[in-house]
Amino acid sequence: MINTPPRISPILLKDVEYFNFSNTEIKKWLKKISFLLILVLIQVSVVGQSAPEIMFNEKNYDFGQIQEENGKVTHRFYYTNIGTADLIITSVRTSCGCQTVNYDKTKSVPPGQEGYIDVSYNPSKRPGAFNKSVSVFTNEPEMNVENPIPHKIYVMGTVIEGQAALSLSGGSVAPKVERYSETYFVGNLTTNAYPLTPEERKLKLEVKYNSDKGTVDIRPRGGEYHEGRSIHFTCGRSTMKLKSGEEINCWTTLDLDRLKVDNIVISSVTVQEFVGYGPKYKPSTFPVNISLDFSVWKTDWAFRKALKGGLAEEINYLEICPYDDHKTKLENDVVSNKVKNIEDIVYVNDNYPTLKYKLTEKMLSMISSISDCRTFLKYYNSYASKAEEVLYNLLKETQSQSDIDAYIEMFPTGKHITEMKASKTELQYYAKALDGDIQECATYISKYPNGRFVSEIQSRKTRLEQLKANSNKSLWKMGNKICHCNTYGVTMVTLDQWNEDKSNFKGIVVASPGGLYEGTILQKGNLLWIEPENWHKCLEDEIQYALNNDRSVEAEKLLSEKNMKFPRGTVVSQTFQTGWLFKFNNTITAKVEDWNDDFTKMKIQIVSTGGLNYFNGESIYEGKYIWVSPIGWQ
């Protein structure tokens, strides 16, 4: 039943008092009328605004029959913006991975103008009919909702399955054979030319069962092709039950690395039929004439394998590669991608010298040491001038005399030989100044007033002069900070008093790197009687260094913890039994000089070898420094 509103006569203002607003039915229809008026206003508003609208010239395209081996096909769908605002394709979605689309994602189409969407279909491994859709989303107002309904365009057609690159030579179907009242036939045996995946290396065998006598279990076996070798097929299970008229696809995967022949000829395929109870099979043998030539296939597979392999695989295959285009690709790959360092270039030059001069510049750019330069000259002596320039730039700032000697040996008449010899002489004076006294520093400064190391040597000379002045004990005063420097760091004491002849002074430990001094722990605050030799009045930077590296507070703790059983300066020994039946005792005596960071090894100086020539497989002699474990020493 359809509800209709009551008829209402026009009501004057003066008659309002007679209008019954409590009437429920009238109120309902007033609400409906109000809602309709709002819809009308919204529609008018929308109509008044500009909006895009898409119209496709066609929405369906039939490719017809397409050949699988020809690859993907593409069709361009044109559309027109018949609206009043710019049209934008916001999204395009395909219905399967076999499709791809192409369109200008940044372009907007003005009113009256055209755009397009390219839709491609890939027929690879998709034989048979297809009908695929593409969903198109735009900025049209009706799509500005939560679940918009897209525009649809369609491509369709039929894919004709591609022919195998290698196929039967004696026909595609073997003859039917009658046996045990059942009829079998063996169909195509095919393969692809480029075995990139295990799937693509399969030989496929089709078995069909034609009989009205129930079902049969079969197990296909391969045919012999070379010196007793056979191809064995599988159908996914050990046996396969077939009904009348059913077909199965069985296969075998060829391992090209193990295939010892380039040609396969198969004259028969055997299918075993399961009968009765228990493992009883009756073989059915079907004559076939299969002749497959794998020579090109195997060569291409070896090329691809080498290309994906390492440097050694590529070089090994290059030596036997039969095709010039394969050789070119492999050689370019070796030069551009496989050679990573000088050792790789040496390997290539030794094993495939054809590429030698293609690698000259690359090896030149890798020279970073004397050894690299020697290796370069071994193979590219005719480019010695370039190698000299590289090595010269490496050694311009060197402080190693041996490096300069190597340069002079390799390039005795080189472009920069005079400069390098002068640099060597300067380094000799520099080394003397570093290890020598004030006079050696003055000699370097006088010879090389603008030398590379003049600032460093001038600073050293100034410091040595300060140390000489500060070593004059007659200038020391009570309360002065007196320092002693060694490999462990700086020990600093406060001068407390002198003995009568000033041959010793008493110092109060202020800071030290830890350890002992003349058998006394360098603990902060300890009093020591010290001979002034090798001590001097502290320089300002020494005072700060000593304070920053002070471990005197924990000196005693350092000596007792972390396996540091023997403080620095302690004389230790270890006795060994040697000789026939171990009847001789030999004792090594040494002095503890230092410990490693975790106190598991100590550095000792041999005082007495005890008649032994070796310790822990290392030759020993008096005065030699060695690192040993503290275990076993006393």
Image (cartoon, helix red, strand yellow):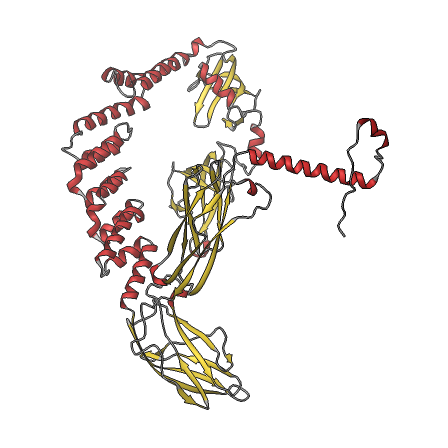
* Relative to 297, residue 150 above or below: above
* Relative to 450, residue 390 above or below: below
Q: Is residue 409 visible?
A: no
Q: Position of residue 466 (x, y in %)?
A: 38, 13
**Residue closer to the observer: 292 or 335:** 292
**Residue closer to the observer: 445 or 334:** 334
Residue 284 lies in quadrant: bottom left
* Residue under the point 44% across and 18% down: 535
Horizontal side, residue 21 vs residue 391: left or right: right
**Residue closer to the observer: 571 or 131:** 131
**Residue closer to the observer: 255 or 596:** 255
Q: Position of residue 536 (x, y in %)?
A: 43, 16
* Relative to 132, residue 484 above or below: above
Residue 222 lies in quadrant: bottom left
Query: What is the total number of numbered labels drawn onto the structure image?
Result: 0
Q: Position of residue 482 (x, y in %)?
A: 47, 16
* Residue under the point 46% across and 12% down: 501
Horizontal side, residue 614 vs residue 9: left or right: left
Q: Is residue 291 visible?
A: yes
